[in-house]
Amino acid sequence: MSITQIKSETKSPSESTAQLLRELVGHLRQHRTQLREEWLRRIFEARLLTAMSRDEIFAEATSVYDSYVEALETRTLEALQAYAQKLSERIIPRGVETNEVVGIVLLLRDVLARSLFSKYPGDAGMLSDVLDAYEPAANSIAITVAVGFVRERERVIREQQEALRELSTPVLQVRERLLILPIIGLIDPQRARQLTEQLLRGIRANRAKVVVIDITGVAAMDANVANHLVLTVESARLLGAMVIVTGLSPEIAQTLVNIGVDLGKMNTVGDLQGGIEEAERLLGYKVVPSPERAPS
Amino acid sequence: MDVPILKQGPYLIATIQSALTDADLLRLRDTIVQDVGVHRAKGVILDVTALDVMDSFATDTLRGIAHMTRLRGAKTVIVGIQPDVAYAMAHMGLKLEGIFAALDLEEGLAYLDQPLEAGRGR
């Protein structure tokens, strides 16, 4: 049955769309190799998917192409959705970016649309009908793939945040009413806020009077985070706890001086040992070597 | 709403039960500053455990109370600031300079019981 025949028959719009899509799918199946080559050429030309080797791109492109055609044929997106998710799982760890994934799907859409121009040369009406059927389907496919990718990425990001939260700094009680908070690694504003929250809750839960914050493991901090540290000290004071900051690196000392910290409020000691000794002194502890077990 | 002011030995304890209006706060201030003289109190405890918001006016008034009572011979300690409130206050630059803050009523009493000079210099 040729296209012109369908047009002459009075069919409902959705049926003729279905007919046009069937025709289209046939066309895409028939020219599979050639269109796929064209698509791959465009991908390489646009320098997309640079994180993957040529063979990998070829394999992925083939399966994307087939799923694409299948989605056009069945006009359901479930299979494609599942495929997009699996694809995302595979390629996200490789460092593929959102723009690349959206880019290649849109390229495929363009390549296929272009091929329609050469299939119906000079038949503008027919071409327009085919494109009417093709474009909404193609767009919803593109959206499905893009959304699948972004959703997968967000899932990965959430997982990483979770892991980070677990890794994050513990508040430890070393003596009655004395807490230490060792901070290691980079502090971003989010982590800084979380640290403060944990510390304030720790002070309340342990009825701490003195807190030693050790930042030996922090190489540098920007003015924002340094300010946050000062705020943390101030907040702790409002809960009746005194904060001793230990292990400031020269860079951090410089940052603190540059932002103009009131040093009268900030109690700092050179290293963690000194900090704990100072805290013990404040709390009235006295550590003496036991006579029976004196170190030899 | 009036804040009850309890006398406990040489100390006055004001427990703020709910968010106060500005007028309530000023009345609290006037009452406390006066009562310090009437009862010859040596210390004042302002308990804000029930407050989940502390705005600049409240902070300012509490600071005012502390400074005024000191001039009239009584130390003031603020107790029971909630962690979230403390963080919010620090963040908004609401400082309680020169005022001692303690975790709870018990800590506050312990602080006031220390001789004057031992006030850890904060």
Image (cartoon, coloured by chain):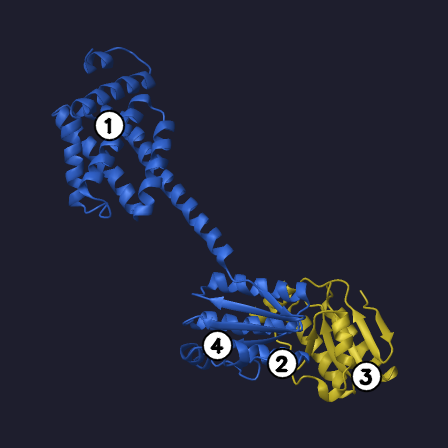
Chain colours: A blue, B yellow
Real-space CA distance between mark 2 and mark 1, rounded to the nearest whole angstrom? 88 Å
Say which residue label 1 marks.
A131
Real-space CA distance between mark 3 and mark 1, rounded to the nearest whole angstrom? 88 Å
Q: Looking at the image, do the residues carrying marks 3 and 1 touch, with CB atoms under 8 Å apart?
A: no
Q: In this view, does A206 lie above or below B109?
A: above
Q: In this view, does B62 lie to the left or right of A18?
A: right
Q: For the residue marked with disc 3, what is the amino acid? A: Lys
Say which residue label 3 marks.
B42
Among the two numbered marks 2 and 1 on one chain, the one whose residue lies closer to the N terminus? 1
| Residue pictured at 25% horizontal, 38% vertical | A106
Q: In which quarter of the image is residue B78?
A: bottom right
Badge 3: few (under 14), some or many (20 or more) residues near its Cα, within 10 Å? many
Can you tell which mark lies on residue A247? 4
Real-space CA distance between mark 3 and mark 4, rounded to the nearest whole angstrom? 40 Å
**Which percent across, then down, holds residue A56?**
22, 39
Foreground: disc 3 or disc 4: 4
For the residues beneath circles 2 and 3, the answer to whether they share a chain is no
Q: In which quarter of the image is residue A172?
A: bottom right
Real-space CA distance between mark 2 and mark 4, rounded to the nearest whole angstrom? 26 Å
Chain hosting mark 4: A
Say which residue label 2 marks.
A289
Among the two numbered marks 4 and 1 on one chain, the one whose residue lies closer to the N terminus? 1
